[in-house]
Image: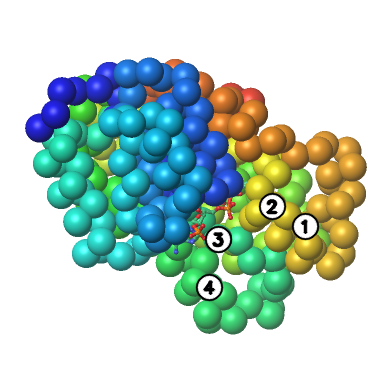
Amino acid sequence: MSSSPSTIYLVTGSNRGIGFSLVSHILASHPDAFVYAAARDPPKATALEELSNKYPGRISIVRYVAADAAGNADLAKVIKTKHGRVDTVVANAAIVRVSNTVLEATASDLEEQFTVNVVGPVLLFQALHALLKASASPRFVPISTAGASLGSPPITLPINIAVYGASKAALNYVTRKIHFENEWLIAFPLAPGAVATEQFQDAVAQDKAGIFHRFLEQAPPRAPDEAATLLVDLIDKATRETSGGAFIDVDGSRLPW
Ligand SMILES: NC(=O)c1ccc[n+]([C@@H]2O[C@H](COP(=O)([O-])OP(=O)(O)OC[C@H]3O[C@@H](n4cnc5c(N)ncnc54)[C@H](OP(=O)(O)O)[C@@H]3O)[C@@H](O)[C@H]2O)c1
């Protein structure tokens, strides 16, 4: 086992978008940290490879495919051998399809988005449980969305994100449940706000009613690097008392479930 960094992070879905910016920001701002940057297809993760050259010995590009239990077990084995623990897991990988009302949703829509957005983080938590338990300050933070809130305005708008929203609401539930089931852990779903990533651009392009366009005119999305700075700060500062089991927004406030 190599010498121990101050904090060992694992970020899924990290070869682009918010995940990439999280990894990049952690490496730049936490000189003692080590990051497991998880990507679906590491050989194609060229941007991460560049980070790996920039920060030699501080980043390992690992494979994470949502809901692949055997792959998760391999990933856990790699971390166990190298560090014996993981401190902060950011379950960021997700997909969004802006396509259907509930009436139109197909079984494959439901299966695909629930598999990546719910089954993925749950199996990841299971695989990393022992490694989190070995940490002195363990955190499990799935990235959610304010659009999954049952009690705030987005649900009333005619944006066809019913399946995505439902998958993230389920993710919120299991994360809050993880909080109650594991009194040694800091776990909470974190909403990043609107962030100018491919996923966001896709969502805007798929929104036939133009709701996102109108929303954007009032509140432009943050750049991924700006969002990452805010999110890492919230994740690092979180305690079980302040954030555990709560639905936290990018500005640090609590969102209604
Ligand atoms: N952007 C926003 O405005 C916004 C708003 C609210 C919430 N969020 C949430 O923020 C997180 C990041 O979003 P983003 O905008 O950065 O999205 P993104 O640019 O689309 O990136 C998504 C990441 O997830 C990975 N991924 C997708 N399917 C996967 C699978 N089956 N297995 C493993 N990895 C998979 C992608 O890998 P590949 O590169 O291999 O496809 C990619 O790295 C998500 O949880 C999203 O729901 C984003």
Residues under numbered marks 2 and 1 in contact, where contact means CB atoms less than 8 Å apart? yes
Dot 3: within a 10 Å radius of its alpha carbon, few (fewer than 14), some, or many (20 or more) residues?
some
Q: Which mark is residue 204?
A: 1
Q: Quadrant of the C terminus?
A: top right
Residues under numbered marks 3 and 1 in contact, where contact means CB atoms less than 8 Å apart? no
238 with respect to 1 (left or right):
right
Regarding residue 90, the answer to whether it shows in the image is: no
Q: Which residue occupies 27% across, 19% down?
A: 6
203 with respect to 234 (left or right):
right
Instruction: Please give the residue where the numbered disc 2 appears in the rendered image.
Output: 200
Marked residue nearer the N-terminal end (1 or 4): 4
Q: Which mark is residue 110?
A: 4
246 with respect to 89 (left or right):
right
Q: Pick the residue in front: 238 or 152.
A: 238
Dot 4: within a 10 Å radius of its alpha carbon, few (fewer than 14), some, or many (20 or more) residues?
some
Q: Which residue occupies 32% across, 18% down?
A: 32
Find out if the beta carbon at label 3 lies less than 8 Å from the nearest ligand 1 atom.
Answer: yes
Marked residue nearer the N-terminal end (3 or 1): 3
Q: Is residue 94 above or below residue 19?
A: below
Q: CA distance from mark 2 to mark 3?
A: 10 Å
Q: What residue type is disc 4 on?
A: Leu
Q: Quadrant of the N terminus?
A: top left
Instruction: Please give the residue where the numbered disc 3 appears in the rendered image.
Output: 95
Q: Which residue occupies 64% across, 29% down?
A: 226
Q: What residue type is disc 2 on?
A: Phe
Q: CA distance from mark 3 to mark 1?
A: 14 Å
